[in-house]
Amino acid sequence: MTNNTTCKFALPILLLLLAPGGLSAQYFYGQVTDVKEIPLPGATVVWAGTTIGARSDDKGEFGIPLPADTTRKPVYLVALFGGARDTFAIDDFSAYWALAMSAAVTLQEVTVRDENTGAYISVLQPIKTEIINRNELRKAACCDLAGCFETQSSVQPQTTNILTNAKELRILGLSGVYNQVLVDGLPLIQGLSYTYGTGTLPGSMVENIWVVKGANSVVQGYEGMVGQITVFPREGGTAEPFTADLLVNSFGEKHLNAAVSVKKTKWNNYLALHTSQPGGKWDRDDDTFLDLPLLTRYSMYNKWRYRKENEDGWSAFIGARYVDEKRNGGQKTFDPETGRGSTAAYGQAVAFRQPELFTKTGYRFDANRKISLLASGFRQVQDSWFGVLHYQGRQNSAYANLQYELFWGKNRQHDLKTGISYRHLRLDEDITFSSDTLPRSFAGAYRREENIPGVFAESVFNFPAAKLTVITGLRADRHNTFGWYATPRVMLRYQPRPNTDLRASIGTGWRTVNLFSENINLLTGGRDIVFAEALRPERALNMGLNATQKWTLGATQFTATADLYHTRFQNQFFPDYDTDPGKAIIANYTGPSVSNGFQAELSAAINRRADLRAAYNFLDVWRRPNGEKVLLPFNARHRVLGVASLHSPEPLWQFDLNLHWYGRQRLPDTRQNPEAYRLPDFSNSFALVGMQYTHTFKRGLEIFGGCENVFDFRQKRPILSWENPFGPYFDTSFAWGPTRGREFYVGVRVRWKESFKGKM
């Protein structure tokens, strides 16, 4: 086992896993109105064919326990008021529905309206889950996955390297390697794909994004140490038959997406194509280096689904994705065709190809039992030049998860998932130098192979009288080099009232380090790499508390939430850049390393015409080498987010505005550098403002335009020692703010909403 703490923690979880329990009902929320949208107090709502019911309050709002079987949709809800009786088909229990009753008893005259804003906290999930849907993704350009969080406060996109414009998704102020990114429930961003993986998923093919902070489910793995981001791509059963969008920005970059959706009786298919084309050569700082690389990308995503997972019998989906990408940057005079490895100009040239296959196959025996197999595999071949450094990487990855799910107890009140998993990774990396301009010693071949079988169990227990839900999970995995690791986690949810949620979580996680792909700055700069010792897996304990309160005041629906999280590492890795200015020392760090995070957020949806959100984040991320507390660099201790969306009641026009304010950030120590290459200890604070206008026409046509970084704030000349890119002090890792400045963009979207129907 990893340590005594983990073993002590695992014992009570095992007892909880084996303990019997009943599941208290979770709630479905909505409001009953008449055809003029006037609230109807005292209306009765009942799930059809059951005695489960509720009565609306003086504002027409209600919270009704969910039906016993939430997997079969739609479920019919009967509303009664006076002499009127209407029936509504409900297919999304996490949404807040406005039910407009008619005077007649016919479904044709009933209006059902989904009142969800673009981003909301699910009332259905026991774990606090922030859901970002397509309404939210329309508020910004969202060219790729990193751009999908421009209006969010829980996830922070962070540029990790200026030359390559590589980005990661941070949660709780910690590197993106500590949260798990899943696509369709499968971990497809790992190893080599981590460096540029968030950029290869276009926002246009995303249906929903689920964000969980802190400890989460153990079913998908052991790596989600501070959170989990799950991306659900669009599907043939729900997407429009044809969609296309084009975006062009003021730097000359072009992004084009097109998708076709086909729906049959038992089969559906979704095919999406994407390309990004480079813009011009921009150097607004006059430091001879491009402000952004020239990006060329082609990708294809295709997914076939057979039957729905909530139907008895067999169901399956199988898909494939292919990405071909090139990023060329560096000095303006660099020619990627002839200048690779030359000292005439510093050049950065990255090219990779990544084919993927993924599938999920399941068999549902009945309403209480099902078994499913998730599997995926991908290969990435990468060839990169950073100045005179030549990096070649080849990775083969495979993942499989076989799980059995059982609902049991009164009204299927207990949920148990148990199964086995297997991971394989083979990573071959070769580093050579075309010139000995610097005495760097880390050229060579790096080989690594991981085989990790695992077993897991996760249970959900609800206690009706106490209004308490308890989720317990435990998994054990055996690494072929490092041996056995246990990963226990517990999540609690307490609902004192229908609109109040109190949650707590605690759990451990661990991961192995992918040195070069996760620390690309080691390759782009002039430092030598010194391996002081072999790296061991990183391990951490995370604890969290959060509270959510919803209420209605007049025509405005409010949601307030507050989060408090503490993460403590038992072993952590980050290159030591401070000890020697010419070296990056690679070693394990077992001293105190802590992240404390607090977030408060208030959102308001006003009469279907405006959505407002304000959030504040405080992050205290530090370690204590040699007994002295040192803040981790590139983390703003204070962040503020403001988002406003004004729109017409029906889809016609929409104006979106967002404001980000970042407090100052500690920068790496450069006091040992020559005076010309020294930086201040802290960055400046800064604010960014973005805005967008969207206009919707008939027949599925939409035009939009906007501006990011309206006031053109830029971190000027962020590259250290840019005058001597082949010298020992050249460093591209000092990005603490935007470097590309103001960006205008315009775009058009096409949506053909007519359905293709047929039988197969």
Image (cartoon, rainbow, N blue to C red):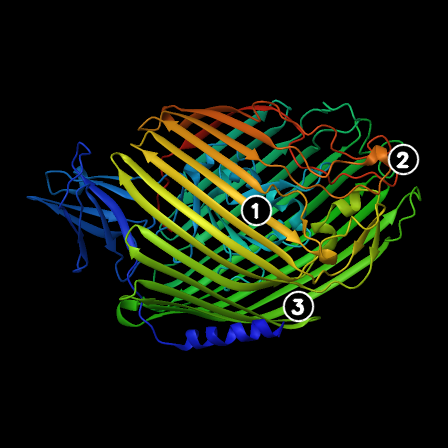
- As drawn, is 686 to the left or to the right of 394? left
Residue behind mark 2: 343
Label 3 belongs to which residue?
Answer: 451
Rendered location of residue 614, percent (x, y) = 44, 36
Which kind of residue does numbered mark 1 sit on? Leu
- The answer to whether residue 366 is seen in the rendering is no
Q: Amino acid at mark 2?
A: Thr
Q: Which mark sits nearer the N-terminus, 3 or 2?
A: 2
Mark 3 or 2, closer to the camera: 2
Q: Secondary structure at mark 1?
A: strand
Rendered image quadrant of residue 677: top right
Seen at 63% across and 26% down, the residue is: 713
Mark 1 or mark 3, earlier in chain: 3
Of 49 and 498, nearer the camera is 498
Q: Position of residue 404 (x, y in %)?
A: 44, 70
Numbered circle sitting on residue 619: 1
